Image (cartoon, helix red, strand yellow):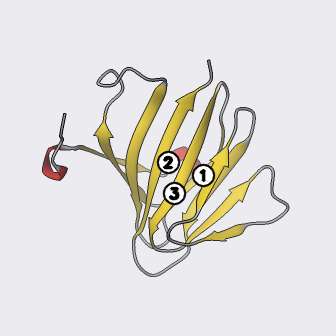
Amino acid sequence: MIRKADQMEREFRQNMRGGEGTVQIIHLFKEGEYKGNARLYARIVLEPGASIGMHEHAGEEEIYTVIRGQAILTDSTLSQEQLMSPGDASLTLSGQSHAIRNAGSEPLEIMALVLRNT
């Protein structure tokens, strides 16, 4: 199956998980279209100043990969915020929390994959 970029479902969320601004979620494929244990596979765009607030993952884990821009990641396993650049990735396991915000002057684009623990 191939899904062209203009056919992907786009979702806009204000103040996502208590964060700032608007977050655009571009669903490459939606749950139910694939057979694996993924809950989400999406490209996420945060405009300058936008963020996804601190939230915990229970029974699942999430991987972020920065595609474009600069991100500040707050993670319950880190002693301080960390700068992430294109190509960098983070892993948040079940029982851990994280937040991410755009640290630059251009849009921040990340890939997000949420996997259910089995």
Report the amino acid beneath label 2: Met
The residue indicated by pointer 3 is 65
Report the amino acid beneath label 3: Thr
Residue 107: percent from left, percent from top: 39, 71
Gap in angstroms between the C-alphas marked 1 and 3: 17 Å
Of residues 86 and 14, the one drawn nearer to the viewer in this rendering: 86
Classify residue 100 by image quadrant.
bottom right
In the figure, 23 relative to 88: above or below?
above
The residue indicated by pointer 2 is 16
Gap in angstroms between the C-alphas marked 2 and 1: 6 Å
Residue sitting at the far right: 79
The residue indicated by pointer 1 is 53
* Residue 114 placement, left or right of 44: right
Marks 2, 3: nearer the viewer: 3
- Residue at coordinates 51% horizontally, 57% vertically from top-left? 65
Gap in angstroms between the C-alphas marked 2 and 3: 18 Å
Of residues 22 and 77, the one drawn nearer to the viewer in this rendering: 77
Residue sitting at the far front: 1
Residue 68: percent from left, percent from top: 42, 70
